[in-house]
Amino acid sequence: MLTAVITSPPDGDVIAGPDATAVTFAATLAGAVPGGAPLLLRWWSTVPPDPWAVANLSAPVDFDAIAIAPQSPAASLTAPLRVGSQAITLAVKDRPGDGAADLRQVTQAASAGGGPDPYLPAAGPGGVVLPRSFGLWAQAPANWQTDDYKNLNLVSYAWAIAPSGGGPAISLPPAGTDLSFRAAVPSDHPAQRVPPLVGLETVPAQVPAGLAMLTLTVSATVPGGMHGQHQIQVSVTVQD
C-alpha cells in the first residue's frame, strides 16, 4: 500500500518574514508498486497561494492554479506561503489528470497532512478517558488572541460528541460562544510539552457521561469561497 509522510515543513512550525517566501516542502513515499506508473505529487494549503485564482474558478477546475505548486514527480520543492494559519496537505496519485475518467484509472494514491488533532488525555488500558473538567481542546496558533492575528485568522474549530447509547450528536461550541485559549507550557522534555490550545474549558453538562465518539472539525474559508476542512474522530469515555 502506498503511504506518504510529510517531512517538511514540520507540524506546528511558525514561518515568518522572508522565510515565508521560500518554504521547503518535502515528503517520503513508501509502498509503491515496483514498475508502476510514475507518482505525481501536489501540495495544498487551506490558504491558497492565489486568492484571485480561487475567486475566478471555471469548469473544468485547474487544480494546479489553486495548489501550492503544480503537480510534479518531485518529492521536494520550494514555494511561498501566504500569511495566516493554515493546514498543509499532500496528495499523491499515479495519473496526471483530474477528470472523472482519469480518477477511475488511478491504481495508487495516498495523502498526508491536514489540520490539528484534538488534545486529549493519554489513552489508558480502557481507551481515552475524558474528565469533564479537562475540557475540549485542539492545537491553535500561538498568536490566536492578538488583534493582528484575529484580522487574518480564517480557521474555525468545532467539536461533535455522539453518545454511543444513541441519540443525535451534540455540536460544540454553541453558536456565539468564544473559545478559550491556553498558551504553550514549556518543558525540558519534548514529550511533555503542551502546545498552544484553543477550545472549551469544560465538557458541557449537555454531553452525557459515558462512551462517545468525539469528532473535531477544523475548517478554513477564504475570500472567494475556497473551503478546506480537516476532520478526525476519537472514541472517548466522558467522565463526571
Image (cartoon, rainbow, N blue to C red):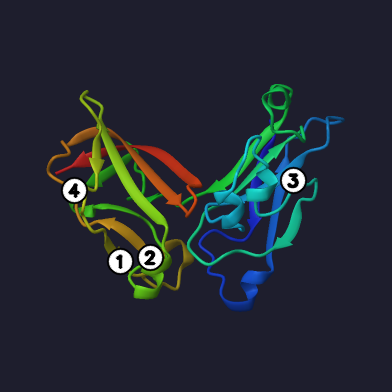
Give percent across and percent down for residue 135.
24, 52
Q: Amino acid at mark 4?
A: Arg
Name the mark nearer the viewer: 1 or 4.
1
Circle 2 crowding by C-alpha within 10 Å: few under 14, some 14–19, many from 20: some
**What is the C-alpha distance between the residues marked 1 and 4?**
17 Å
Q: Total marks drawn?
A: 4
* Amino acid type indicated by mark 3: Gln
Question: Which residue appears farthest toward the right when viewing the image?
Answer: 35
Task: Identify the mark nearer the N-term, 2 or 1.
Answer: 1
Mark 2 vs mark 4: which is more N-terminal? 4
Report the Cα–Cα distance between label 3 and label 4.
45 Å
- For disc 4, the marked residue is 132
Position of residue 212 measured from the top left corner of the image (x, y, whole percent) = 27, 33
For label 4, the SS is helix
N-terminal of the two: label 3 or label 4? Answer: 3
Which of the 4 quarters of the picture holds residue 60? top right
For marks 1 and 4 on the same chain, the one whose residue lies earlier in the sequence: 4
| Residue 138 quadrant | bottom left
Instruction: Indicate the amino acid at tag 1.
Output: Arg
Q: Where's residue 116, x and y in %?
A: 45, 52
Instruction: Report which residue position mark 3 lands on.
Output: 71
Which image quarter is the C terminus in?
top left
Determine whether the residue tagged by mark 1 lies in a helix, strand or loop: strand
Dots 2 and 1: beta carbons under 8 Å?
A: yes
Residue type at numbered disc 2? Pro
Q: Give above or below for 77 relative to 41.
A: below
45 and 27: which one is in front? 45
Residue under circle 2?
196
